[in-house]
Amino acid sequence: MTRIELRRQIELAISQDWPAFVQSHPKLAAVLDQNLLVEEAARALEDDPQYTSAMAQALAHGAFAQSITDLIGHFVQDWLRRLI
């Protein structure tokens, strides 16, 4: 997965979770820059052992599995929770 594709997947995951985050933490959401969140999440995800393992397996099998997209979504959900 290229950096651009990873960023798109993270943007999608954040946009799906953003309304709940805003509702739970309106003041924090008001001051957070979503573009900065995407970049920081991408940096954190690239260091995540579960993500790197899933990517290595997908590359070895020559396929991009839906499970990687799901993994990114779950990672972003957990990562947003850890922000507070």
Image (tube, helix red, strand yellow):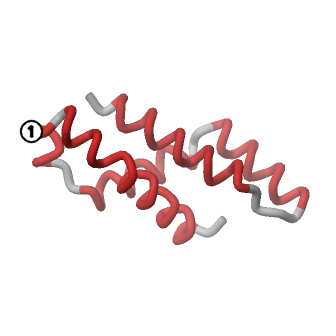
Whole-percent x and y of residue 83? 30, 33
In this rendering, is residue 59 above or below 50? Answer: below
Whole-percent x and y of residue 42? 47, 53
Q: Secondary structure at mark 1?
A: helix
Local packing at callout 1 (Cα closer than 10 Å; few below 14, some 14-19, many 20+) is few
Single out the residue that lies furthest toward the right: 61
**Relative to 39, 25 lies left or right:** left
Task: Depth check: give the residue in front, 66 or 55.
Answer: 66
**Relative to 17, 28 lies left or right:** left
Taking the spot 45% from the left edge, 53% from the top edge, the residue there is 13
Whole-percent x and y of residue 79? 42, 36
In this rendering, is residue 33 above or below 24? Answer: below
- Amino acid at dot 1: Lys
The residue at which mark 1 appears reads as 27
Taking the spot 75% from the left edge, 42% from the top edge, the residue there is 53
Q: Quadrant of residue 49?
A: top right
Whole-percent x and y of residue 15? 36, 56
**Relative to 81, 1 lies left or right:** right
Of the 4 image quadrants, the one containing the N terminus is bottom right
Q: Quadrant of residue 62?
A: bottom right
**Relative to 83, 71 lies left or right:** right
Taking the spot 30% from the left edge, 48% from the top edge, the residue there is 18
Of the 4 image quadrants, the one containing the C terminus is top left
